[in-house]
């Protein structure tokens, strides 16, 4: 593993790996992110087959990865990374279309967020920072309505039995997370402290064995805590 990179203020920079079969995308995103204080691009790859070795060598916080690639696609690569490394690094999937067929399955596989390839520079930078901080959800362009589109399909799974282990307050907070609210926004809605909300979110993740907030969104829709389109 590599030593943590440092930003100009002495704190550890967010280490990012970029995986995309288009060289111009890698170069453009890499140059943009590397120029940001607190972010360091530590590696790049052109194919999903290279991801595991690259992650092993560079120990990144974030993998920014194209969802559609030759040989091993982003979905397969996300599964491999999650199986080998758990919840770190966090994975942000790059997609060309809002309703990419792989999006919902990629969330299941361990992706923490999504970004359209034509997203603004500010959205890309914000996505890396937000996901690295654990507030993993979806980019402004790929909203919760996208998730609702997928979980509304007939093949959605039944309510997970483990939901019975959640308290009423945890179920309520789970629903708020699924609607895209941050901890601060949930605290305001439910008249709780932000720390209390954070504690509840941590308990939800532990009880349901979920990796991050993105998977809370999936579980909430599948369990019927929130209804698609609501």
Image: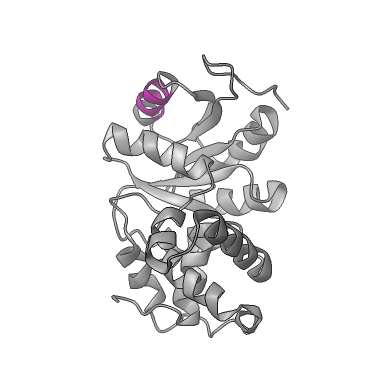
Question: Image quadrant for the N terminus?
Answer: top right
Q: Residue at x 45, y 51 (%)?
A: 113
For residue 60, above or below residue 28: below
Q: Nearer the viewer, residue 19 or 193?
A: 193
Q: Magenta span: helix, strand or loop, mainly?
A: helix
Q: Residue at x 48, y 51 (%)?
A: 136
For residue 43, above or below residue 71: above
Q: Is residue 111 left or right of residue 185?
A: right
Magenta highlight range: 26-33
For residue 211, above or below residue 119: below
Q: Give the percent coordinates (x, y) of residue 206.
A: 67, 64
Q: Is residue 102 visible?
A: no
Q: Give the percent coordinates (x, y) of residue 162.
A: 65, 80
Q: Residue at x 60, y 33 (%)?
A: 60
Q: Is residue 208 left or right of residue 100?
A: right
Q: Give the percent coordinates (x, y) of residue 189.
A: 38, 66
Q: Is residue 119 visible?
A: yes
Color scheme of the displayed model: one colour
Image quadrant of residue 48? Answer: top right
Q: Is residue 40 left or right of residue 99?
A: right
Q: Residue at x 59, y 38 (%)?
A: 51
Q: Give the percent coordinates (x, y) of residue 222.
A: 48, 77
């Amino acid at each position: 593993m590599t030593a943590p990179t440092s930003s100009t203020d002495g704190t550890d920079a967010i280490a990012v790996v970029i995986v995309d079969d288009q060289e111009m995308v890698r170069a453009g995103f890499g140059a943009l992110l590397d120029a940001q204080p607190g972010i360091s691009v530590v590696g790049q790859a052109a194919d999903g087959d290279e991801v595991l070795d690259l992650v092993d060598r560079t120990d990144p916080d974030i993998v920014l990865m194209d969802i559609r690639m030759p040989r091993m696609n982003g979905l397969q690569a996300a599964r491999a990374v999650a199986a080998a490394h758990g919840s770190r690094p966090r994975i942000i999937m790059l997609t060309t279309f809002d309703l990419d067929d792989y999006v919902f399955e990629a969330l299941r596989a361990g992706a923490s967020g999504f970004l359209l390839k034509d997203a603004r520079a500010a959205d890309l930078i914000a996505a890396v920072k937000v996901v690295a901080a654990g507030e993993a959800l979806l980019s402004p362009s790929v909203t919760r309505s996208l998730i609702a589109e997928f979980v509304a399909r007939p093949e959605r799974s039944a309510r997970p039995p483990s939901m019975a282990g959640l308290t009423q307050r945890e179920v309520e907070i789970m629903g708020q997370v699924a609607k895209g609210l941050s901890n601060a926004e949930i605290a305001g809605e439910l008249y709780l402290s932000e720390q209390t909300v954070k504690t509840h979110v941590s308990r939800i993740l532990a009880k349901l064995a979920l990796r991050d907030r993105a998977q809370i969104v999936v579980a909430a829709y599948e369990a019927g805590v929130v209804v698609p389109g609501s």
